Amino acid sequence: MLKNVARLARWAGIVLLVATGIAPLQAKDGVVELLGTVQAMPASGLTGDWTIASRAVRTDAATLIKQELGRIGVGATVEVKGADAGGGVVLATTIEVKQGVPGSLPPIGGGNGLGEFTGAIESMPAAGLLGTWRIAGRTVIAVSATRLQQELGGFRVGAIVEVHGLVGASGSVTASKIEVKVGGGTPVPPGAGADLEIVGTIDALPAAGLLGDWRVGGRLVRVAATTVLDVEHGAFEVGVPVEVHGIADAVGALLATRIERTAGNGAPTPAAMFWGSVDAMPGPATAPIGLWQIGGRVVSVSASTAIRQNDGPLSLGAIVEVKGWLQGDGVVLAHEIETRRAIGAVPGQASAAVEYVNDRLGHYFVTAFPAEIAALDAGAFGGAWRRTGQSFNVGGGAAAVCRFYGMPPKGPDSHFFTVDAVECEKVMRDYRAWTYEAHAFSVSAPVGGACAAGQVPVTRFFNNAPSGADMNHRYVVNPQVSVEMRGRGWIEEGVVMCARP
């Protein structure tokens, strides 16, 4: 009997009739809305009698047929709005295609890199809800920032869902939201989505105590009595960096199993910093929340993201600098987005990183900060540092380099540089001996340990000192210097960044 009972749901303020069976038509303000599959059409043309979701639907010359999202036909998913014509017949005022005839995939998106469509789930990730879906013939990727909404039922194959997200060149969609509309099953329980780890600063805490709703990196985090709160590296307060482990619930919040104040230097500065043009954004700079596409990367913008338009307006095509936290699936949780004049433009940065050596320590150091260069050239630190004659060009690359200092006695009297945001985050989090100082300059990141044609490989060498206090790294572009360093027993760690020619 239950399968013959129609399910009613509210959608857009109009009664939505879900035809899982046949029930008397119901309407609000005289309007009936029906969502389902076209099962039969008029023999000729589009005017006449249809069967949609097991309902009799009639069209006339005044009925508007919308096919922006696909071609109408038997098998297409459509939304019908109309009036009760009596006898169980809906007289349609509009029929709008939500998913075209199987096998036809109309383009989606309005030219801004964003798109939305409605259709049936054909397949889901093998484990959990994050990963690759197949919906209405399209590949859909659910990432850690995707909102998975199940208010009208749980995700299952055959359920009709609405998808919003970033449209790739192949037509695949990185989803900002997947929402069940029709035919869902039992809501997927919290934790079935996937185990997640996010790194970010605390944006908000409960009004009293630590149990309740937090916001970390713009994401809702729910803390219960069972959540392990690790305060080894300091107390929890707004603005401090934390690492959160948990499971996604049905609406995208993170049910925290463990929250840890990060170690290392404790700097709240995001490890990832890069430049790129804005390929897709969900709205104007005044309403930016959602998934963006910047320089080919997926960026999640929240209410806590700082939007700065210092070098021009923020719009599609604008060049921006992004600071944030890189997540395990490649999504960047944005802490700040700022317009820039050019890729890799760092205010006050010199055009080259200049190398110095301290003969007494046997340590090497590079800097692209003009004030620092001027000070060292003028004999700062008792004239202990002199130029080696080596340098490499910086600026113009799409990735920023993290700079760390040992800061004796806590760590070695030495600097360490990395363009790898994952490595930067790990050093920040796990190594107290290294204090994060700044993003030093912009270069390009190597791919597979190699640089693109025309770029200059920068190789990192490690002196493998017998004591941690004496450790040092050198960053080399000259092949003859590389030979010299190998001959001195320094360990070659490979190409770690790519400089301008």
Image (cartoon, rainbow, N blue to C red):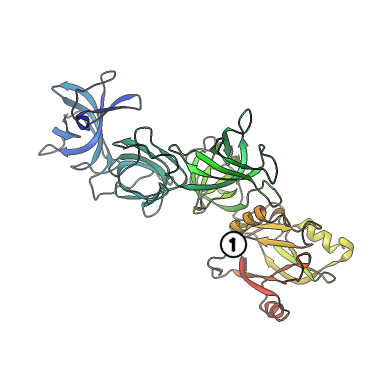
* 467 is higher (above) or lower (below) than 42: below
Q: Residues within 10 Å of mark 1 (few under 14, many from 20)?
A: many
The three-letter code of the residue at mark 1 reads Ser
Q: Tell me where residue 418 appears, x and y as whole percent.
A: 65, 61
* 214 is higher (above) or lower (below) than 244: above
Q: Tell me where residue 365 appears, x and y as whole percent.
A: 76, 65
Residue 467 appears anywhere in the view: yes
* 484 is higher (above) or lower (below) than 324: below
Which residue is drawn at the image coordinates 62% and 54% (left, top)? 425
Horizontally, is 426 left or right of 407 in the view? left
The one nearer the camera, 415 or 206, is 206
Q: Tell me where residue 95 appears, x and y as whole percent.
A: 24, 33
The residue that label 1 is drawn on is: 444
Q: Residue farthest to the top?
A: 29
- Quadrant hosting residue 409: bottom right
Which residue is drawn at the image coordinates 76% and 57% (left, top)? 370
Q: Tell me where residue 214 appears, x and y as whole percent.
A: 58, 35
Q: Residue farthest to the left?
A: 43
Which residue is drawn at the image coordinates 67% and 46% (left, top)? 268
Residue 318 appears anywhere in the view: no
- Please identify the quadrant where the C terminus is shown: bottom right
- Quadrant hosting residue 446: bottom right
The one nearer the camera, 495 or 343, is 495
Q: Determine whether the residue tagged by mark 1 lies in a helix, strand or loop.
A: loop
The one nearer the camera, 451 or 424, is 424
